[in-house]
C-alpha cells in the first residue's frame, strides 16, 4: 500500500512529469505484455520451427538474460 508521502509526491508532479511517467509505465507494461504473448504461444512457436517446447523456452530465457547483460 502506498504511503501518504508517495501520494503527495504524485500530486506535486507537473503535467510534463506526469506524461513522462505515464509513457514510461505504458512502455514497461507493453514490454511485459508481449513477453506473455510469446509464453502463451510457446508450443505453437516450437512446432513451427521444429523444436521442443523446452528448447524454445530455454532460448527465450537465454535471449532475455543476454539482453539484460548488455545494459
Image (cartoon, helix red, strand yellow):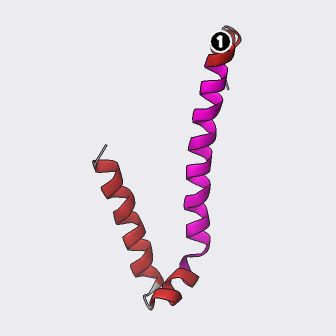
Residue drawn at x 71%, y 11% is 11
Residue 63 picture quarter: bottom left
Instruction: Give the vertical position of 25 relative to 51 (above or below).
Output: above
Q: Is residue 35 magenta?
A: yes
Residue drawn at x 58%, y 83% is 44
| Left or right of residue 23: residue 69 | left
Task: Tell me the element at label 1.
Answer: loop
Q: Residue 46, how many percent across, how many down?
A: 49, 84
Tell me the quarter of the image containing the C terminus.
top left
Q: Residue 40, how many percent across, how many down?
A: 61, 71
Foreground of the two, 19 or 25? 19
Q: Is residue 1 magenta?
A: no
Residue 67 picture quarter: bottom left
Q: Residue 30, how many percent across, how many down?
A: 61, 49
* Residue bounds of the magenta highlight: 17-43
| Left or right of residue 17: residue 57 | left
Tell me the quarter of the image containing the N terminus.
top right
Residue at the spot of label 1: 13
Q: Magenta segment, principal secondary structure?
A: helix
Amino acid at each position: 500500500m502506498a504511503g501518504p508521502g508517495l501520494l503527495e509526491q504524485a500530486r506535486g508532479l507537473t503535467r510534463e512529469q506526469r506524461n513522462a511517467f505515464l509513457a514510461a509505465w505504458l512502455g514497461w507494461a507493453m514490454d511485459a505484455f508481449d513477453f506473455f504473448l510469446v509464453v502463451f504461444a510457446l508450443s505453437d512457436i516450437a512446432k513451427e520451427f521444429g523444436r521442443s517446447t523446452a528448447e524454445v523456452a530455454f532460448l527465450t530465457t537465454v535471449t532475455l538474460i543476454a539482453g539484460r547483460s548488455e545494459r
